[in-house]
Amino acid sequence: MTEVSRLNADDVTTNIASQGISTREAGTSTMRTQRHGGQVRTVRPDPELLAFARQMRDDFARLQMEHEFAVDEVLTKVSILQREFMHLHQYNPIEHVTSRVKSLESILQKVAKRGIDWNPQAIRANLTDIAGVRITCSFIADTHRILKTLTSQTDVKVIEVKDYIANPKPNGYKSLHAIIEIPVFLSTGPVPVTVEVQIRTIAMDFWASLEHKIYYKYDGAVPDRLVADLSDAADAAEQLDRRMEQLHTEVRGAGSSAEAADTSDELEEELLLRLWQQSRQNT
Ligand code: 0O2
C-alpha cells in the first residue's frame, strides 16, 4: 500500500482541497493557479495524490452507479408485487415508495466515522445502506406481507432482518429493516449489491420523520420533555395503526373485496360472451 492510500477520508479530502482539486475535478484538471501578491503561480499537484484522487473518483462513481441500478431493481420488484396484489386482491397494500443512494459526502462521513478501510471492497462489505428503499404500507399486516414476498424471491439474498415493529427502539422507533443482496447484471457479469429496505406504516413513517427532524435539530441531545412526548406520540401512532387495521378488516370481512371481485368477474364474463357470439357470427 502506498503512503497516499493509507490516508484516512478526512486527510484525503483535506489534502486534495488544500491542493485546489476537488474529487470531482481531479480527473479533468492537473494544474491550478494561485495568486500571491499580484503574481499568478502555477501549482502542480503531487502526482501520486492526483493518481489516487482519480482512482478514487472512478471507484466511487462505479460504487454509486451499481447501487443506483440495485435500487432500480428493487423498485421494479416492488412495483410488480404491488400491481400483482392489486390484480389478485383488488387492494393496494403499498401507500408509497421512496428511494435514495447515499451521496459521496455522506458515504465518506460514515467511512471516516466507522474507521472503515479506504477501499471500495471494504466500503461495500461494511456500508450496507448506500442504497435505500423505503416502502410505506397502509397497515401493519401489509408490512410483514411485503417483507415476506420480497425476501422470498430466489434472486434476493437476505443478509439481515431487524423487526423494530415487534421490538421497537427505546425512543419508540418502529419499522421493519431488511438488508438484502441482489444481483445487478452489468456487461462484465452479475455484481451482488446490498440494499437496505425499510418497511413501515404511514403512522410509523410520520413519527420517524418528525423524530428525525427533532434529533437533528438538537444534534442528538433531545431534551427529556421532548423524548417523553415522542414516546407518547409513538404509542398514539401504534393505537391508530391498530384501530385503522381493525376497521379495514371489518370492512373487507363484510365482503367489499368479494363484491369487487364479483363485479370484475361479471364484466369479464360478459366480454368473453360477446366475443364468442361475435366469432360465431363471423363463421
Ligand atoms: P439515514 O440518514 O436515514 O440513512 P447503521 O445504519 O448500520 O449505521 P444501525 O442503527 O445498526 O446503524 O442500523 P438500523 O438500526 O438498521 O438503522 C438504520 C436506519 O434506520 C437509519 O439510518 C435511519 O434511517 C433508520 N432509523 C434507525 N433508528 C431510527 C430512529 O430512532 N429514528 C429514526 N427517525 N430513524 C431511525 P441512518 O444511517 O441513521 O440515517
Image (spheres, grey):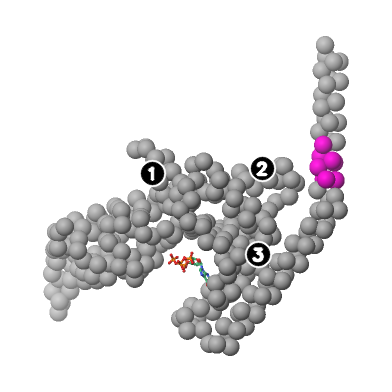
Q: Is residue 231 above or below residue 185?
A: below
Pointer 1 residue: 191
Q: Position of residue 156 (x, y in %)?
A: 49, 45
Q: Residue at x 27, y 57 (%)?
A: 119
Does label 2 or label 1 sit earlier along the sequence? Answer: 2
Contact check, label 2 and label 1, Cβ < 8 Å: no
Q: Which residue is mark 2?
A: 84
User: Residue 274 appears in which quarter of the rendering?
Assistant: top right
Asked whether the beta carbons under mark 3 and mark 1 sit within 8 Å of each other, the answer is no
Q: Work out whether 202 lies above or below 188.
A: below
Rate crowding at label 1 as few (under 14), some (14 to 19) or many (20 or more) other CA atoms within 10 Å.
Answer: some
- SS for tag 1? strand
Q: Residue at x 68, y 53 (%)?
A: 93
Q: Position of residue 80 (x, y in %)?
A: 61, 44
> Which residue is at the front of the view, 241 or 38?
241
Q: CA distance from mark 2 to mark 3?
A: 21 Å
Residue 135 lies in the magenta stretch: no
| Residue nearest the observer in this picture, 78 or 243 | 243
The residue to which callout 3 is attached is: 202
Q: Residue furthest front?
A: 167
| The N terminus: image quadrant | bottom left
The residue range painted magenta reads 258-265
- Dot 2 amino acid type: Glu
